[in-house]
Amino acid sequence: MSALIVPIILAGGQGTRLWPMSRSARPKQFLPLLGSHSLFQESLKRVANTRYADPIVITNNEYRFLVAEQAAEVECGLSGVLLEPVARNTSAAITAASHFAAQKFGKDAVVQIIPSDHSIVVDESYWTAVDTAAAEARTRLVTFGISPTRPETGFGYIEIGTERSAGVHEVARFTEKPALEEAQGMLASGKYLWNSGMFMFAVETFLSELEKFSPDISALTREAVDKSVVDLDFVRLDKKSFEASPSISVDYAVFEKSSLVSIVPVDFSWSDMGSWDAVWTASDKNSDDNVIVGRIGLSSTQRSLVISEKAYVAVHGLDDVVVVASEDAIFVGKLSDAQSVGHIVSGLRASPETSHLTEIHRTAYRPWGGYSSVLNGDRFQVKRLFVKPGKKLSLQKHFHRAEHWIVVSGTAEVTIDGTISMLTENQSIYLPLGCTHRLANPGKILLELIEVQTGSYLGEDDIVRIEDEFGRV
């Protein structure tokens, strides 16, 4: 048995309510919304404590390199990275990770379920809550309840039952997202807490309760783990088994049905960072209650959130607004109605002309670095490539396009049909259509290039990988 709490970090969500920054290719948990580190990295730093074992991360296959890179940046060791082949809500994700934890740490290991997209201020009250929950979790399923500060209709609520021990209560009932009038009554009663989505339990207790209420989820996710395949530093869950698991929340699958559920009320600072007004609430503000990030100029503006990735943004004479300018899209709306961005994203996603704005950023990140789109035209496009020191792209070829590479800074090692050339600043090279080629950065500083593509088809899927150190062949 592990004497340490085993963190299970959920990092597979594709939330879009923080559009245009958060998109399916790089969702909010991997964005540095409140400082230099992402919400996922803040979650990793939170469990870098003597109470915890190295965390298990479960994430979407598309985010595997983001997880690995961001964990390395904060020097956090991982007990495993499980890759979901498809999204199946929290019940399948948590159960698969629990089966994995049982194999690695034993069935009596206590795990803590940690969403990676929450903002939490770690103080003494946080550690008191963790220690209280850990003691209760030896024999019970524990959820953390957040003291509500407003009649929020976007959260689930939990009614507090009788006290079991100091800081621990029975759960009277769960309530799904209520209407405003009901939420106001819950807030006034003082008997309800927000459902935080954070849990703690012994794996054996959780799996036993799951067998009672959702045996199919338990069996299929166990099979997905048993038939998993190790790929580099990742564990690929079996697709057929995992895909067959019902897509429901862990609350509905177990917690709302079990008689072994306890709740620990907490009062530490918490936010699910589910909307731009939540980001404003959690951020440091100036004397006019404004939050600004980037190159911003404000005049006669109060209680607003203004963020810009690159462009200079000037705002005059407005109150209660949110302005978010990404590289290729801008959102402007009332801060107090920021939840409505979800409706905008749904509309964008439904249209072929705008669906890409919900999926990818102009800057795309890869395990070797990434690229930014600079200019697109008929039969040509221009990109900025950046390659990290010591990294290299796959050995590859294209059937429909030729490329020109111009080095802006750093040193490039270019392989074309077996011939290696070294290029430095202001030098360029031509890669003819159909050639086998590879780009590498042998230096100690970031390599930056301008890539000009020309040809009849310029899609990212026009690529044949021959060798790849990241397992993408």
Image: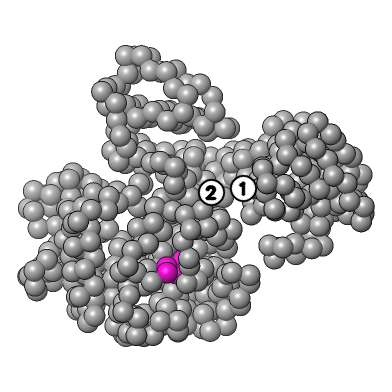
The answer to the question of whether label 2 and label 1 lie on touching residues, with beta carbons closer than 8 A, is: yes
Could you tell me which quadrant the N terminus lies in?
bottom left
Of the two numbered discs 2 and 1 in the rendering, the one whose residue sits closer to the viewer: 1
Q: Quadrant of residue 205?
A: bottom left
Q: Position of residue 393 (x, y in %)?
A: 74, 53
Q: Is residue 107 visible?
A: yes
Residue 343 vertical placement versus 297 (above, below): below
Q: Position of residue 124 (x, y in %)?
A: 19, 56
User: Which residue reaches farthest front?
Assistant: 444
Task: Give the extent of the magenta segment.
Answer: 54-58
Q: Secondary structure at mark 2?
A: loop
Q: Secondary structure at mark 1?
A: strand
Amino acid type at image mark 1? Tyr
Residue at screen point 59% across, 69% down: 233
Residue nearer the viewer, 217 or 234: 234
Total residue callouts:
2
Residue designated by label 2: 26
Could you tell me which quadrant the C terminus lies in?
bottom right
Residues packed near mark 1 inside 10 Å, few (<14), some (14 to 19) or many (20 plus): some
Q: Position of residue 87 (x, y in %)?
A: 50, 64
Residue designated by label 1: 365
Q: Is residue 220 visible?
A: no
Disc nearer the start of the sequence (2/1): 2
Residue nearer the viewer, 456 or 55: 55
Q: Is residue 190 magenta?
A: no
Residue at screen point 46% across, 28% down: 294
Majority secondary structure in the magenta region:
strand
Residue at screen point 75% across, 50% down: 442
